[in-house]
């Protein structure tokens, strides 16, 4: 009994610890799941509220979108649906109507017929004007005397009237833009004949290839040809031709010789008046690289015997 009383008493105590934190990852997963369920619900609602024909169009587009876009058909772009737009122009709300080849060919033929009719009327006016100016030259004794210096030609741009120089009968004073009296008579008669013309007119001045004798302040054949064209314009307007009828007035110097094989020939010094066709007007008026912009008419040249050029 004494030995039993001496045995030690062992007491076991269990220590309790707090649970570890679980984190919030499950909340993100749950939010993604709810978003997906909402999107699925909306998709089912849209499909349930769409007509069967529209569903077939949507299915056909997504099964072969390139075929519908390139070849046409009953895809979403050619029908009214809850999906706006479609086709080549995405701004269209009710779809696009594809034009047939027959409609496009008819439209093209209509445009070509209109152009052909306009060209025919232009040709009639140009030929009538040529006959009129021919009659004026023949009936006027003063013009008939200078008939060899007046050339009328039908060109792709219209009726071209060229007044050319002759060796012993210059149109302008030497090296200047002073119009000779007989040249003034020619321009006045032509200007009166052009008073009622519907077409626009192009006026250009030309010189031969002889270098300008007095190059003070950079004055050259370019300025000289432009000044002569401008002087001719004033005579035409004074005779009754409307100033607004002129489409352009340019100086071409020796860039467009009448006789390239003889660049210093007197015939290269000329004034060209072109009554333009509608097609030529659209083509020429749109050019940006006109030969030379007009400068104000040059003042009367000072006499300089050492540098006076030949007749130009």
Image (spheres, rainbow, N blue to C red):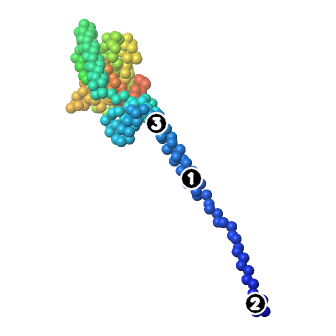
Question: Which residue is denoted by mark 3 in the rendering?
Answer: 48
Q: Quadrant of the N terminus?
A: bottom right
Label 3: how many Cα within 10 Å (few below 14, some 14–19, many 20+): few
- Camera-nearest residue between 294 and 11: 11
At x 40%, y 16%, the residue is 243
Q: Find the distance from the CA under tag 1 to the CA under tag 3.
A: 27 Å
Number of disc labels: 3
Label 1: how many Cα within 10 Å (few below 14, some 14–19, many 20+): few
Q: Classify residue 234 by image quadrant.
A: top left
Question: Which residue is denoted by mark 2 in the rendering?
Answer: 4
At x 64%, y 63%, the residue is 21
Q: Nearer the viewer, mark 1 or mark 2?
A: 2
Q: Classify residue 225 by image quadrant.
A: top left
Question: Which residue is denoted by mark 1 in the rendering?
Answer: 30
Image-based side of 295 in relation to 13, left or right: left
Q: Circles 3 and 2: CB distance less than 8 Å? A: no
Q: Position of residue 292 (x, y in %)?
A: 37, 30
Numbered badge on residue 293: none
Q: Position of residue 306 (x, y in %)?
A: 35, 31
In terms of secondary structure, where does tag 3 sit?
helix
Q: Residue furthest front?
A: 1
Vertical side of 60 occupied by 242: above or below: above
In terms of secondary structure, where does tag 1 sit?
helix
Vertical side of 12 occupied by 287: above or below: above
Q: Circles 1 and 3: CB distance less than 8 Å? A: no
Q: Find the distance from the CA under tag 3 to the CA under tag 2.
A: 88 Å
- Camera-nearest residue between 293 and 90: 90
At x 40%, y 36%, the residue is 55
Dot placed on the residue nearer the N-terminal end, 1 or 3:
1
Q: Residue furthest left?
A: 261
């Amino acid at each position: 009994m004494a030995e039993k009383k001496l045995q030690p008493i062992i007491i076991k105590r269990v220590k309790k610890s707090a649970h570890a934190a679980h984190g919030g990852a499950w909340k993100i997963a749950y939010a993604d799941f709810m978003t997906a369920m909402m999107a699925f619900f909306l998709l089912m609602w849209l499909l349930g509220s769409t007509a069967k024909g529209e569903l077939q169009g949507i299915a056909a587009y997504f099964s072969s979108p390139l075929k519908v876009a390139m070849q046409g058909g009953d895809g979403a772009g050619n029908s009214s649906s809850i999906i706006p737009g479609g086709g080549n122009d995405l701004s269209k709300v009710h779809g696009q109507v594809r034009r047939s080849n027959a409609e496009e060919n008819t439209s093209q033929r209509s445009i070509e017929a209109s152009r052909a009719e306009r060209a025919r009327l232009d040709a009639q006016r140009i030929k009538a004007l040529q006959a009129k100016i021919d009659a004026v030259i023949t009936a006027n004794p003063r013009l008939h005397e200078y008939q060899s210096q007046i050339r009328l030609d039908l060109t792709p741009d219209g009726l071209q009237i060229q007044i050319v120089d002759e060796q012993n009968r210059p149109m302008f004073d030497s090296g200047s833009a002073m119009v000779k009296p007989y040249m003034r008579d020619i321009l006045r008669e032509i200007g009166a004949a052009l008073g009622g013309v519907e077409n626009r007119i192009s006026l250009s001045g030309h010189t031969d290839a002889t270098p300008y004798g007095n190059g003070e302040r950079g004055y050259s054949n370019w300025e000289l040809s432009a000044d002569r064209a401008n002087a001719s314009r004033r005579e035409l307007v004074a005779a009754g031709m409307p100033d607004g009828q002129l489409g352009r007035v340019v100086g071409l110097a020796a860039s467009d010789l009448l006789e390239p094989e003889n660049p210093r020939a007197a015939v290269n010094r000329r004034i060209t008046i072109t009554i333009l066709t509608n097609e030529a007007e659209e083509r020429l008026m749109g050019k940006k690289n006109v030969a030379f912009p007009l400068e104000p008419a040059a003042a009367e040249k000072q006499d300089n015997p050492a540098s006076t050029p030949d007749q130009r």
